[in-house]
Image (cartoon, rainbow, N blue to C red):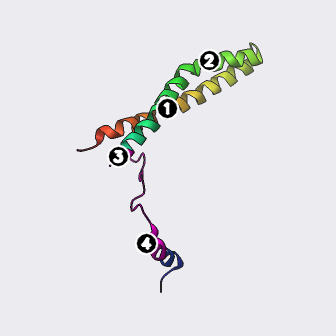
Amino acid sequence: MRTTAEALRRQYSKYRLVTTIPFRGLLSGNWIPRNRVEVVGALLIGTPFLSGGFIFLINARSAMREARLVFGNSVVSAGVGALAEIVIFILGAALLFLGLRFVTSPLNRKK
């Protein structure tokens, strides 16, 4: 006896135009773009990630100045500014890492 999911899959499989899922295993350790669409997609997605990561890292120091403007020169402003600086730096590093993975993935492609 088949399950309901198997029956539905079998029934609608003739309507499926794409046999593979695009970007399957995206950002896994062994993901390699297989066709030109995936290469262009990886470059188009990776470039804003890279630039956003660089912008976050460059502007991380401005969080302390912004906290001093809002809270004045106090211990609260130093704590809030340091916490914001750390969070912005971590976000920038994550964006930079993801952008590098996207942009360098087409280079790993075997021809």
Q: Amino acid at mark 3?
A: Pro
Whichever of labels 4 and 3 marks the residue nearer the N terminus, that label is: 4
Q: Locate residue 29 relative to residue 4 in the image: left or right.
A: left
Q: Nearer the viewer, mark 1 or mark 2?
A: 1
Question: Tag on residue 60?
Answer: none
Where residue 73 appears, x then y in whole percent?
74, 12
Q: Residue at point 57% right, 20% down?
A: 59
Whichever of labels 1 and 4 marks the residue nearer the N terminus, that label is: 4
Examine the structure image and report whether residue 10 is included in the region drawn in magenta. Answer: yes
Image quarter of residue 100: top left
Q: Amino acid at mark 1?
A: Pro
Residue bearing the label numbered 4: 14
Q: Nearer the viewer, mark 4 or mark 3?
A: 4
Residue bearing the label numbered 2: 62
Q: Residue at point 74% right, 21% down?
A: 76
Residue bearing the label numbered 3: 33
- Dominant secondary structure of the magenta stretch? loop
Examine the structure image and report whether residue 26 is included in the region drawn in magenta. Answer: yes
